[in-house]
Amino acid sequence: MSQDHPANLLYTREHEWARIEGNTATIGITHFAVEQLGDVTQVDLPREGETIRKEDVFGSVESVKAVSDLYAPLSGKVVKVNNPLNDTPQYLNDEPYDDGWLIQIELSNPAETASLMTAAQYAEFLRDQDAH
Amino acid sequence: MVPFGGWDMPVSYPAGILEEHRTVRTAVGLFDVSHMGEISLSGPRAAEAVQRLVTNAVGKLDDGAAMYTVMCADDGGIVDDCIVYRRAADDYLIVVNASNVVKDRAWMVERAGALATIVDESDATGLIAVQGPRAVALVARLAGRPLGDEVSAFRFARVDVAGIPCLVARTGYTGEDGFELACPEGSTRRLWDALLEAGATDGVRAIGLGARDTLRLEARLSLYGNDIDSTTTPLEAQLGWVVKFDAGDFIGRAALLAQRAEGLKRKLVGFIARGRGIPRHGYPILVEAGGAPVGAVTSGTTAPSLGVAVAMGYVPTALAEPGTMLVVDCRGKPVPVEIVKGPFYRRSASS
């Protein structure tokens, strides 16, 4: 299961992940999220320079089956957007932790990272979800 | 992400909806549609009973012929859409939507029970749809004889397929050529396995409900409960071609005649998204961004064969002309849509 939730990432209950490097965070959605969505056909993301706030909706992912909101795991200013997803949304299905990343933000409140789950906690969270 | 709510039917798709969709458009796919209902009406006055219930002309059917039609209530609202098969002059089979079997049977018994023996054969019947450009050849191979000419569009025949007695009908719900095979319930698994095995060289796949929905939507076929229901009439739903007013005094005829005379207030139209966003079931249809809703999307999806999003919905007749530009409010985002005529996808004539 380790490749399902890489150990170097932090996770949310809404199935986003964040990779913290210094004062920036790269954000994406998890393998589990992608499995649930099925084939992704469109991704709506903020523009560079916009600010997003933890737990607010910052975009959406459309799959053939459904549309799902993206909730910001952390607050900050968007410094990079994975624009190739516009033309190749299947990166999300194929490589959710690599080519399927969504945005990169400059953290405005790095202390927020303390509220996110580790890979082990996220795995446990999924197990609990499954049990219900 | 939200906890992925709003999924009516969480089904797992090993190949994924897009790959399954492609398989049916380019090769052949199998659908286990045994959940569909099969109700028979038999007896000397069976034809009269069926004509009482459906809007299409039962008298046009000969043995081995099938037709698409709807059953209406007295007010013209659609009770169900269905396919009527004439097995013999005194024996008809009506294939109905799974979710409506109990309601339909009760309706048939109430309104035509005095005219025919009505039996719900659903539990005894398995149904497998074989759809795609290679479907006819695959079934013919398992039948050991060519079927393409013998069983033409909307015809059916009793044929042994892989040694299993089937009712093989040239019908479907995908916009592709193919058959639907009704067999004894206990043989369904064996028939399924035989089709999978024999179709391996054709690239056959099992197809889930997700691709069933994208395929039927591209072909612009209505789904009961979404695009048509008891609050919509076949005339509004652009199914006027299955309403034959001179066929007999079917239930709903007077209401439909009155509606036709009055003129339709709204119509079911198909439209293509001309911007990013997928119009989905329930999203409001507007004349312009920020305006008041004039209708709602009844079905919508990305159309894998076309690379755009397509949808259907009811709009006022004045706005129903092909070419009309409207707006769908996709969760607060206005997405321009263009009304188009006819199916979104048409298979090439050669198949």
Image (cartoon, coloured by chain):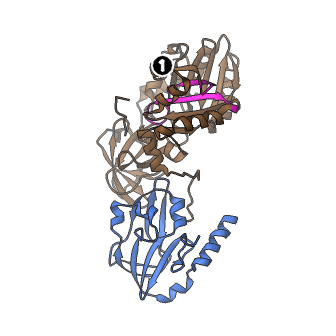
User: Where is residue B277, by image quadrant?
Assistant: bottom left
- Estimate the x, y position of residue B172 in percent, counting from the top left: 50, 32
B294 w.r.t. B233: above or below: below
B151 w.r.t. B179: above or below: above
Q: Does the magenta stretch include residue B173?
A: yes
Q: Mark 1 points at which residue?
A: B245
**What hue represents chain B?**
brown
Q: Residue at x 44, y 48 (%)?
A: B300
- Estimate the x, y position of residue B220 in percent, counting from the top left: 42, 38
Chain letter tied to blue: A
Disc 1: which chain?
A: B
- Estimate the x, y position of residue B113 in percent, counting from the top left: 70, 20
Q: Which residue is drawn at 44% across and 38% down?
A: B27
Q: What stretch is highlighted in magenta?
A: B161-186
Side (left or right) of B241 relative to A47: right
Q: Which residue is drawn at 70% across and 65% down?
A: A131
Side (left or right) of B339 relative to A55: left
